[in-house]
Amino acid sequence: MTRIPIEIEKIKVEQRNFTIDQHPDTPKYSVVTRYLFKLAEKGNIWTKTIICDRDDLLKLREKIDTLLLQTTTAEVLNISEERSSVVDEHYQSDKLCESCSYKLTHKCVECLFVLQSPLERLLFLELTKNKISFRTQYGVNWNGKNIATAGREYGNKDYNFKEVLTVPDFYIEKRNVKLCVYTDGHTYHERTEEQALRDRNIDRTLQELGFQVLRYTGKEVKENVGKVVADIKKWIG
């Protein structure tokens, strides 16, 4: 991220007192508060400094606020107007967005358009807050390698989804640990026998390929996401 090369600091300046009917005891000079505005060229080849007063800074702030208010969500996030409308709608009605620290950032775009459920989004935000590095929707092929999944379809001979073993909701790799994390919308008891068998087979294959697997129910994530994050931290050391 590019840092704006501007610094502002409060300073004290000696100013001559000019009045027509100046009393003899009035000091010729007084100390007033001013602001030193510094603009540095990239690489610090030169620095421009300006001494200004409070009114000047207020006018600058007003202009900046006006420009920011005129900048749309689509412009800030560099997304289409259609997606921008979706983001704005979430900001107005989505509880996860109410106190989110990642509004109008690339994290926001990933949270709303890459993740596939509120459960994933909740865990996504908690992992991010805890500064845990992860990848979302991480495709794994039958050889344990990362594989692109976008656009794949069953029956497509050139880009068949059958080449994908699984797509963990979150993939975390740290030191010698390769961890696949899943958030299931159903509880263990709600899963059909077919779903449970499929998950067990995937987990077994992943473990044979050197991965660790953690699966959490929707209830676990919603009611105690802090414990889920703590578990993940233990696994990755």
Image (tube, rainbow, N blue to C red):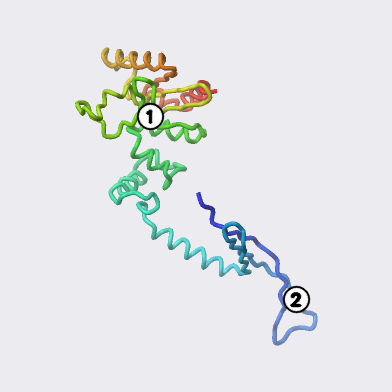
Please identify the residue farthest to the right as the structure is shown.
25
The amino acid at mark 1 is: Tyr
Q: Which mark is residue 29?
A: 2
Sequence-earlier tag: 2 or 1: 2
Please identify the residue farthest to the front as the structure is shown.
158
Residue 154 locus on image (x, y percent): 22, 26
The correct choice, above or below, for 129 with respect to 4 in the image is above
Q: Which class describes the residues within 10 Å of circle 1: few (<14), some (14-19), or many (20+)?
A: some
Residue at the spot x=59%, y=67% of the render?
A: 54
Residue 18 locus on image (x, y percent): 70, 82
SS at circle 2:
strand
The amino acid at mark 2 is: Tyr
Q: Is residue 50 left or right of residue 17?
A: left
Quarter of the view holding residue 96: top left
Residue beneath label 1, please?
138
Count the marks: how many? 2
The correct choice, above or below, for 159 with respect to 10 in the image is above
